[in-house]
Amino acid sequence: MNIPPSNIFTLFQQTATRIPQQAALINGQSTFSFAELGARAGRLAALLQKTGAERGATVALCLDRSPELIIAVLGIVQAGAAYVPIDPTYPAERIAGMLEDAKPPVVITCKAHQHLFKGTTAKVLLIEDIDLKNGPLFEGPCPAGPDDLLYVLFTSGSTGRPKGVAMHNAPLTNLIQWQLRTSVLKEGDRTLQFAPISFDVSFQEIFATFAQGGTLVLITDEDRLNSTQLLRKIIAEKINRIIVPFVALQYLAEAVERTGEIPSSLKEVFTSGEQLKITPAIINLFKQLPGARFCNQYGPTEGHVVSELELKGDPSTWPALPNIGKAIDNVKLYVLDEQMKPVKKGEEGELYLGGACVAKGYIGRDDLTAERFLADPFVSGGRMYKTGDRAAELPNGEIDYKGRIDGQVKVRGYRIELGEVEVAMEKHPAVEQAVANVREDRPGLKRLIGYYVAKSELSTNELRKHLASLLPDYMQPSAFVAVKELPRTPSGKIDRKALPAPDVKRPELDVAFAAPQSTVQKTLAHVWADLLGIDRVGIDDNFFDLGGNSLLSIQCVAQLEGHGLKLPIVKLYQHPTIRACAAFLEGDASAVSPAEMAKARVGAKHVSPQWDIAIIGMSGRFPGAANVEELWRNLLAKKNSISTWTAEEIDPSVPAELRNDPDYVKARGVITDADKFDHGFFGVNPKVAALMDPQQRVFLETAWAALEDAAYDPAQFAGLIGVYAGMGNNTYFTRNVIGHPELIE
């Protein structure tokens, strides 16, 4: 009799004992054996044991894609604790709610993200400060039992508050053992680590691979989001298995068609997370992969993978919308009516999950747990989960997925409760009522649309900024529609089918429309307008303010490749306007203004700071004060630094009528020595220096003075120096230079 292990870490440990020197993890040029990975995880587990993260505890985990992230997952589960992934791009309010529910005594993060946890009472461990190569190892076997938590994953909540699915070892051990039984992979085969750690598929990628004795290959976010680069990574790394949502598979298939490059190393392709559609591109892909096993997997976070359909034979004969197959080992799938009675085969009902897959519930949310996790009426002492999915059992026993019963949707592979989006919209003081809905105006492209009745004037841009502070990127609507009233059914409910399509007109933005001029700008504008579903795009419009998201970014990069323009996806985040993108593509960095570059950096939500910033030098010129220290002394002494003059002392260029007007105030702040400038020091031609605006000369001098105050010589410093500077505008050039052509050679 094959007795299942009591916890998931045992499966990893068994592999590490059997093949310690086998490659377990590859990250670029770095390779970690099972022995190395296990030792580093063991040192972290020992540290966690000392800091209170023992059996049954939760540990918040906020790290970027890296070997350290995988080591942290292993270390947490070896200690018998449960990991709680925290996405660093989430709004602060959402992170605070997750910590409140999960109550982790320990947080593992990095220096770049530690600011997210300033208010927590948990002990914060920085991965950079943990010595993973030396120190004591965890003693004894993993203490976790089948009923102990393994992870807590937060999903969208209909009330506006995300809920944490508490999953224990038993269901996940069952899943991995089923995966081992059915997989065609063998020791040494490679699996791509594609999914974010905050999604349950990442668990499947990590632990199915390690239990198999395979190698997990990490990729960068840039490779993950660019379908061409992803394809080439799969080929270069000789990847044997990928687990991706339908939309990523579709883009990968399109990249194959576009490039003619075949990922022939693939042996297994799993798709999950949303309805699979068999498109011409996918048919073409699998015709070129005759030996690859292709499976459609289904399962909510509350059960992970619970069913699978393997698509066999000629891809041309596959159904356009494949069903979700049959239950995996030790799992029950029930299709029930409203009285929780089984419906006949072929009839629609609600899908319930029973058996070994059912999670414990929602952490810290007993009320929601009681609503969705019920006693199984068909198994004494059993539990089942009410999915909210409509389904029908086919004559052959396979389950046909029919959509949702409630307001939950899947967009870009993400599970979204429409109610949570609506609650966030209605938190804006100018919104009286809001509704979120999903539209598929273009085949294969689902968009989340926000509809609202406004109490007062409200711009789309203002509402978008409001939601960015409350919701993750994937939950923010792509477009907004203001309506006088929301359509209703005769019973008084919101009639979602009657909600209008978004306007194709360019939305109101903070910048005026500026038409594209160059060929590259016009190409970008055409591609953006097509993707975003609007009539025109100005060269200063921000891609993300127009409704762009990560999925549309992938499509944008792919479409530009078709026009012969290669734009790395990270550059789209860094240069989110057409003007900036075109300047990058044309190699003209000077065409991008500093203000535009600064706005681009602020708009790049997914770029996290890598270093702390310290202000270590300041300078300035002020009326009555030659530097910052003198200004503070004058303020403390309440010294008046404004100069006054008689009518005779005022500049002759001021009209006599104005000078003699009794209401004219003959006072002004004056900066001394503005007429003095060392042109040789700054390498400025003396004639040019004579024509320069005095403000510009003072600006150069104070910029250098700030560096002197910081005691750094830029020529001798290898690090990065940021100079934050400001100056006022005036009309010196138009008044004193342009009207005197004799001064200009």
Image (cartoon, rainbow, N blue to C red):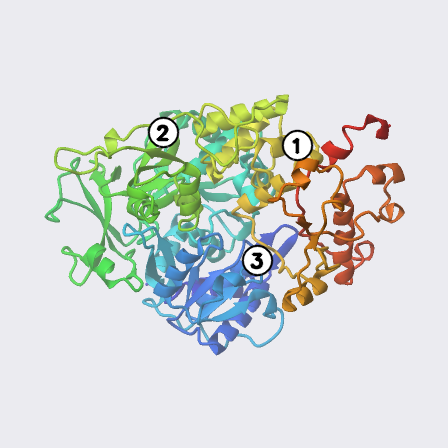
Q: Mark 1 — residue?
A: 583
Check disc 2 and report its element: helix, strand or loop: loop
Q: Amino acid at mark 2?
A: Pro
User: Which is more foreground, mark 1 or mark 3?
Assistant: 1
Question: Is disc 2 in contact with disc 3, using a CB cutoff of under 8 Å?
Answer: no
Q: Is residue 278 above or below residue 661?
A: above
Choose the circle earlier in sequence order: 1 or 3.
3
Q: Is residue 717 visible?
A: yes
- Depth check: give the residue in front, 450 or 70: 450
Name the residue carrying label 2: 502
Distance between the alpha carbons at the discs numbered 2 and 3: 43 Å
Q: Secondary structure at mark 3?
A: helix
Of residues 691 and 599, the one drawn nearer to the viewer in this rendering = 691
In the rendered structure, find residue 67 and report the number of the disc placed on it: 3
Give above or below for 414 relative to 61. Answer: above
- Of the 4 image quadrants, the one containing the N terminus is bottom left
Q: Residue at x 49, y 55 (%)?
A: 88
* Crowding at mark 1 (Cα within 10 Å: few <14, some 14-19, many 20+): some
Q: Quadrant of the C terminus?
A: top right
Query: How many badges with numbers are in the image?
Result: 3
